[in-house]
Image: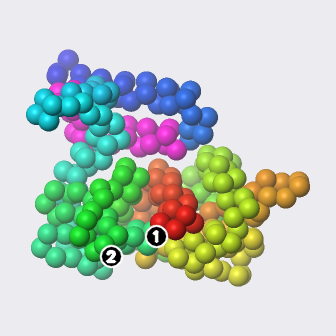
Protein backbone atom coordinates (compact mmCIF):
# COMPACT_ATOMS: atom_id res chain seq x y z
CA UNK A 1 0.00 0.00 0.00
CA UNK A 2 1.39 3.43 -0.93
CA UNK A 3 2.12 5.97 1.78
CA UNK A 4 -0.37 8.50 0.36
CA UNK A 5 -3.21 5.98 0.24
CA UNK A 6 -2.45 4.90 3.79
CA UNK A 7 -2.57 8.53 4.91
CA UNK A 8 -5.93 9.07 3.22
CA UNK A 9 -7.44 6.03 4.91
CA UNK A 10 -6.05 7.14 8.26
CA UNK A 11 -7.60 10.60 7.90
CA UNK A 12 -11.00 9.27 6.88
CA UNK A 13 -11.01 6.65 9.62
CA UNK A 14 -10.18 9.38 12.14
CA UNK A 15 -12.95 11.64 10.85
CA UNK A 16 -15.54 8.88 10.99
CA UNK A 17 -14.52 8.05 14.56
CA UNK A 18 -14.83 11.71 15.60
CA UNK A 19 -18.22 12.04 13.92
CA UNK A 20 -19.51 9.17 16.09
CA UNK A 21 -18.10 10.85 19.19
CA UNK A 22 -19.80 14.10 18.19
CA UNK A 23 -23.15 12.37 17.76
CA UNK A 24 -22.91 10.92 21.27
CA UNK A 25 -21.82 14.21 22.81
CA UNK A 26 -24.35 16.42 21.01
CA UNK A 27 -27.96 15.37 20.52
CA UNK A 28 -28.39 18.10 17.88
CA UNK A 29 -25.66 16.65 15.66
CA UNK A 30 -27.26 16.96 12.22
CA UNK A 31 -25.00 19.79 11.10
CA UNK A 32 -21.88 18.03 12.39
CA UNK A 33 -22.78 14.90 10.43
CA UNK A 34 -23.34 16.98 7.30
CA UNK A 35 -19.89 18.51 7.79
CA UNK A 36 -18.33 15.07 8.03
CA UNK A 37 -20.09 13.91 4.87
CA UNK A 38 -18.87 17.02 3.05
CA UNK A 39 -15.27 16.61 4.21
CA UNK A 40 -15.21 12.96 3.15
CA UNK A 41 -16.50 13.93 -0.30
CA UNK A 42 -13.50 16.16 -1.06
CA UNK A 43 -10.98 14.93 -3.64
CA UNK A 44 -8.36 12.75 -2.01
CA UNK A 45 -5.55 15.01 -3.19
CA UNK A 46 -6.52 17.42 -0.40
CA UNK A 47 -5.33 14.96 2.25
CA UNK A 48 -2.86 12.74 0.42
CA UNK A 49 0.37 13.42 2.27
CA UNK A 50 1.88 12.36 5.56
CA UNK A 51 1.91 15.90 6.87
CA UNK A 52 -1.90 16.02 6.55
CA UNK A 53 -2.32 12.81 8.53
CA UNK A 54 0.01 14.13 11.22
CA UNK A 55 -2.00 17.35 11.44
CA UNK A 56 -5.25 15.45 11.81
CA UNK A 57 -3.71 13.28 14.51
CA UNK A 58 -2.62 16.26 16.62
CA UNK A 59 -6.06 17.49 17.66
CA UNK A 60 -5.35 18.05 21.36
CA UNK A 61 -3.27 20.58 23.30
CA UNK A 62 0.26 20.88 21.94
CA UNK A 63 3.41 22.60 23.15
CA UNK A 64 4.73 25.48 21.06
CA UNK A 65 8.50 25.35 21.56
CA UNK A 66 9.15 28.66 19.81
CA UNK A 67 6.73 30.59 22.03
CA UNK A 68 7.36 28.49 25.13
CA UNK A 69 3.71 27.81 25.87
CA UNK A 70 0.91 25.39 25.16
CA UNK A 71 -1.78 26.09 22.62
CA UNK A 72 -4.81 24.29 21.24
CA UNK A 73 -4.08 22.39 18.06
CA UNK A 74 -6.26 23.15 15.07
CA UNK A 75 -9.51 21.24 14.80
CA UNK A 76 -10.10 18.98 11.82
CA UNK A 77 -12.49 21.57 10.40
CA UNK A 78 -9.87 24.30 10.68
CA UNK A 79 -7.31 22.08 8.98
CA UNK A 80 -9.69 21.37 6.08
CA UNK A 81 -10.58 25.07 5.81
CA UNK A 82 -6.90 25.98 5.69
CA UNK A 83 -6.19 23.34 3.05
CA UNK A 84 -8.98 24.74 0.92
CA UNK A 85 -7.10 28.05 0.69
CA UNK A 86 -4.61 26.32 -1.57
CA UNK A 87 -7.42 24.89 -3.70
CA UNK A 88 -9.11 28.28 -4.06
CA UNK A 89 -6.08 29.91 -5.69
CA UNK A 90 -6.12 27.29 -8.46
CA UNK A 91 -9.45 28.58 -9.78
CA UNK A 92 -9.99 31.34 -12.34
CA UNK A 93 -10.50 34.46 -10.24
CA UNK A 94 -11.30 36.67 -13.22
CA UNK A 95 -14.19 34.33 -13.97
CA UNK A 96 -15.46 34.75 -10.38
CA UNK A 97 -15.24 38.53 -10.72
CA UNK A 98 -17.24 38.53 -13.95
CA UNK A 99 -19.84 36.03 -12.76
CA UNK A 100 -20.71 37.78 -9.49
CA UNK A 101 -19.56 41.35 -10.18
CA UNK A 102 -17.02 41.18 -7.35
CA UNK A 103 -15.16 44.24 -6.19
CA UNK A 104 -11.45 43.51 -6.39
CA UNK A 105 -7.94 44.87 -6.33
CA UNK A 106 -4.50 43.38 -6.88
CA UNK A 107 -4.49 41.71 -3.45
CA UNK A 108 -8.11 40.76 -2.67
CA UNK A 109 -11.54 39.79 -3.90
CA UNK A 110 -14.40 41.28 -1.86
CA UNK A 111 -17.85 39.81 -1.23
CA UNK A 112 -20.72 40.47 1.17
CA UNK A 113 -21.99 37.45 3.09
CA UNK A 114 -25.01 37.85 5.41
CA UNK A 115 -24.55 41.62 5.33
CA UNK A 116 -20.94 41.46 6.44
CA UNK A 117 -18.00 42.37 4.21
CA UNK A 118 -15.37 39.71 3.52
CA UNK A 119 -12.17 39.63 1.54
CA UNK A 120 -10.31 36.69 0.03
CA UNK A 121 -6.56 37.01 -0.46
CA UNK A 122 -5.87 36.32 -4.11
CA UNK A 123 -2.54 34.56 -3.54
CA UNK A 124 -3.13 32.70 -0.26
CA UNK A 125 -6.92 32.13 -0.29
CA UNK A 126 -7.30 33.43 3.29
CA UNK A 127 -10.86 34.61 4.01
CA UNK A 128 -11.35 37.44 6.54
CA UNK A 129 -14.09 39.83 7.61
CA UNK A 130 -13.99 43.17 9.36
CA UNK A 131 -16.17 45.66 11.21
CA UNK A 132 -13.88 48.66 10.56
CA UNK A 133 -13.00 48.63 6.89
CA UNK A 134 -10.24 46.02 7.38
CA UNK A 135 -8.22 48.13 9.77
CA UNK A 136 -8.57 44.99 11.92
CA UNK A 137 -9.70 41.60 10.67
CA UNK A 138 -11.17 38.31 11.87
CA UNK A 139 -10.48 35.07 10.03
CA UNK A 140 -13.64 33.42 8.71
CA UNK A 141 -14.68 30.22 10.47
CA UNK A 142 -15.38 26.91 8.74
CA UNK A 143 -19.02 27.61 7.84
CA UNK A 144 -18.20 31.06 6.46
CA UNK A 145 -15.09 30.13 4.48
CA UNK A 146 -16.40 26.87 3.02
CA UNK A 147 -19.63 28.54 1.86
CA UNK A 148 -17.71 31.35 0.16
CA UNK A 149 -15.24 28.92 -1.44
CA UNK A 150 -18.04 26.71 -2.74
CA UNK A 151 -20.03 29.56 -4.27
CA UNK A 152 -17.03 31.21 -5.92
CA UNK A 153 -15.29 28.05 -7.11
CA UNK A 154 -18.02 25.50 -7.78
CA UNK A 155 -21.19 27.37 -8.80
CA UNK A 156 -22.45 26.57 -12.28
CA UNK A 157 -21.39 28.82 -15.14
CA UNK A 158 -25.03 29.55 -15.98
CA UNK A 159 -26.35 29.77 -12.39
CA UNK A 160 -29.59 31.71 -12.18
CA UNK A 161 -32.57 31.94 -9.84
CA UNK A 162 -35.90 30.28 -10.59
CA UNK A 163 -37.97 32.64 -8.43
CA UNK A 164 -39.66 29.64 -6.82
CA UNK A 165 -38.97 28.78 -3.17
CA UNK A 166 -39.23 25.50 -1.29
CA UNK A 167 -37.95 23.86 1.93
CA UNK A 168 -34.56 22.15 1.72
CA UNK A 169 -36.27 18.75 1.91
CA UNK A 170 -38.18 19.51 -1.32
CA UNK A 171 -35.32 20.79 -3.48
CA UNK A 172 -35.28 19.30 -6.98
CA UNK A 173 -32.97 16.32 -7.29
CA UNK A 174 -33.08 15.45 -3.58
CA UNK A 175 -34.96 12.69 -1.80
CA UNK A 176 -38.15 14.32 -0.51
CA UNK A 177 -38.42 13.70 3.22
CA UNK A 178 -38.63 15.55 6.52
CA UNK A 179 -34.82 15.90 6.41
CA UNK A 180 -32.54 17.22 9.17
CA UNK A 181 -33.51 20.87 8.73
CA UNK A 182 -36.44 20.96 11.14
CA UNK A 183 -34.60 19.62 14.16
CA UNK A 184 -31.56 21.72 13.34
CA UNK A 185 -33.56 24.96 13.51
CA UNK A 186 -35.77 24.02 16.48
CA UNK A 187 -33.12 25.07 18.99
CA UNK A 188 -32.91 28.49 17.33
CA UNK A 189 -36.71 28.76 17.24
CA UNK A 190 -36.86 28.07 20.98
CA UNK A 191 -34.21 30.74 21.61
CA UNK A 192 -36.23 33.28 19.61
CA UNK A 193 -39.37 32.57 21.63
CA UNK A 194 -40.55 35.74 23.39
CA UNK A 195 -38.17 37.86 21.28
CA UNK A 196 -40.34 38.52 18.25
CA UNK A 197 -39.54 42.23 18.06
CA UNK A 198 -35.79 41.62 18.36
CA UNK A 199 -36.02 39.02 15.59
CA UNK A 200 -38.03 41.37 13.39
CA UNK A 201 -35.42 44.14 13.80
CA UNK A 202 -32.60 41.69 13.03
CA UNK A 203 -34.36 40.62 9.84
CA UNK A 204 -34.67 44.25 8.78
CA UNK A 205 -30.88 44.59 9.16
CA UNK A 206 -30.05 41.33 7.35
CA UNK A 207 -32.75 41.60 4.70
CA UNK A 208 -36.25 42.96 4.38
CA UNK A 209 -39.59 42.14 5.97
CA UNK A 210 -42.19 40.60 3.68
CA UNK A 211 -45.82 40.99 4.67
CA UNK A 212 -46.99 38.70 1.87
CA UNK A 213 -45.76 35.59 3.71
CA UNK A 214 -47.37 34.04 6.75
CA UNK A 215 -45.78 34.14 10.20
CA UNK A 216 -45.28 36.40 13.20
CA UNK A 217 -42.05 37.39 11.46
CA UNK A 218 -41.59 36.91 7.72
CA UNK A 219 -38.62 38.19 5.79
CA UNK A 220 -36.36 37.75 2.79
CA UNK A 221 -32.70 37.51 3.83
CA UNK A 222 -29.73 37.92 1.54
CA UNK A 223 -26.83 35.66 2.48
CA UNK A 224 -25.36 36.86 -0.82
CA UNK A 225 -26.66 39.84 -2.77
CA UNK A 226 -27.55 37.47 -5.63
CA UNK A 227 -29.08 34.68 -3.51
CA UNK A 228 -32.18 35.25 -1.34
CA UNK A 229 -33.48 32.96 1.43
CA UNK A 230 -36.92 33.34 3.04
CA UNK A 231 -37.52 33.17 6.80
CA UNK A 232 -40.83 32.57 8.56
CA UNK A 233 -41.21 32.45 12.32
CA UNK A 234 -44.22 31.60 14.47
CA UNK A 235 -44.17 32.36 18.18
CA UNK A 236 -44.88 29.54 20.63
CA UNK A 237 -48.37 29.24 22.10
CA UNK A 238 -50.21 26.90 24.48
CA UNK A 239 -50.45 24.15 21.87
CA UNK A 240 -47.34 24.43 19.70
CA UNK A 241 -43.67 25.25 20.22
CA UNK A 242 -41.99 28.10 18.34
CA UNK A 243 -41.44 27.30 14.67
CA UNK A 244 -38.67 28.60 12.40
CA UNK A 245 -38.84 27.85 8.68
CA UNK A 246 -36.40 28.68 5.89
CA UNK A 247 -37.06 28.27 2.18
CA UNK A 248 -34.64 28.36 -0.72
CA UNK A 249 -34.76 29.12 -4.41
CA UNK A 250 -35.25 25.86 -6.30
CA UNK A 251 -32.01 26.51 -8.18
CA UNK A 252 -29.84 27.03 -5.10
CA UNK A 253 -27.78 23.98 -6.03
CA UNK A 254 -26.64 25.89 -9.12
CA UNK A 255 -24.78 28.08 -6.62
CA UNK A 256 -23.57 25.61 -4.00
CA UNK A 257 -23.52 21.93 -3.09
CA UNK A 258 -26.44 20.56 -1.07
CA UNK A 259 -24.22 20.09 2.00
CA UNK A 260 -23.04 23.70 1.83
CA UNK A 261 -26.61 24.91 2.37
CA UNK A 262 -26.32 23.65 5.96
CA UNK A 263 -23.04 25.52 6.50
CA UNK A 264 -24.64 28.68 5.14
CA UNK A 265 -27.73 28.29 7.31
CA UNK A 266 -25.64 27.68 10.42
CA UNK A 267 -23.96 31.00 9.77
CA UNK A 268 -27.23 32.79 9.00
CA UNK A 269 -28.71 31.67 12.32
CA UNK A 270 -25.54 32.81 14.12
CA UNK A 271 -25.73 36.22 12.42
CA UNK A 272 -29.40 36.59 13.38
CA UNK A 273 -28.52 35.91 17.02
CA UNK A 274 -25.58 38.33 16.91
CA UNK A 275 -27.72 41.05 15.35
CA UNK A 276 -30.46 40.51 17.94
CA UNK A 277 -27.79 41.08 20.60
CA UNK A 278 -26.57 44.27 18.93
CA UNK A 279 -23.44 42.82 17.27
CA UNK A 280 -23.89 44.06 13.71
- In the depicted structure, whether residue 208 falls above or below residue 231: below
Instruction: Tell whether label 1 touches label 2 (CB within 8 Å).
Output: no
Task: Give how far across and how far down residue 198 sits, in percent.
Answer: 64, 69
From this viewpoint, is residue 74 visible?
yes
Asked whether 182 or 255 is in front, the reply is: 182
Please say whether residue 95 is visible from this viewpoint.
no
Q: Earlier in the sequence, mark 2 or mark 1?
A: 2
Residue, x 60% and y 39% (percent of image)?
28
Give the tally of numbered discs: 2
Whether 101 is among the magenta residues is no
Q: Indicate which disc residue 253 carries.
A: none
Asked if the magenta segment contains residue 32, the reply would be: yes
Front-most of residues 25 and 174: 25
Distance from disc 2 to disc 1, alpha carbons, whole Å, reads 24 Å
109 relative to 199 in the view: left or right: left
Q: Which residue is the extreme one toward the top?
A: 1
Mark 2 lies on residue: 100
Q: Is residue 146 left or right of residue 258?
A: left
The residue nearer to you, when weighing 177 against 200, is 200
Q: Residues within 10 Å of mark 2 (few under 14, many from 20)?
A: some
- Image side of residue 52 versus residue 263, left or right: left
Q: In this view, does 91 lie to the left or right of 14?
A: left
- Residue bounds of the magenta highlight: 31-55
**What residue appears at the point 65 percent right and 80 percent down from the top-left corner?**
210
Q: Which of the 4 image quarters holds residue 56?
A: top left
- The residue drawn where x is 83% and y is 54% is 240
Give the residue number, with chain letter if any, for mark 1: 280
Chief SS of the magenta region: helix
Residue 236 quadrant: bottom right
Q: In which quarter of the image is the N terminus?
A: top left
Amino acid sequence: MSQSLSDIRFVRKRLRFESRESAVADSNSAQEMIKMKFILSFPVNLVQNSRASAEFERNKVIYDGQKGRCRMALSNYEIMRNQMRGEFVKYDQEKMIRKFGLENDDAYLYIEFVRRRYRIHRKSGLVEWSRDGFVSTVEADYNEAMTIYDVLCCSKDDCRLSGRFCPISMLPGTVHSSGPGGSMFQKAADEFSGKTEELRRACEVLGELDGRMKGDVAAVLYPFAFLPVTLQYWEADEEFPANLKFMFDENIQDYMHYETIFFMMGHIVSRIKETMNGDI
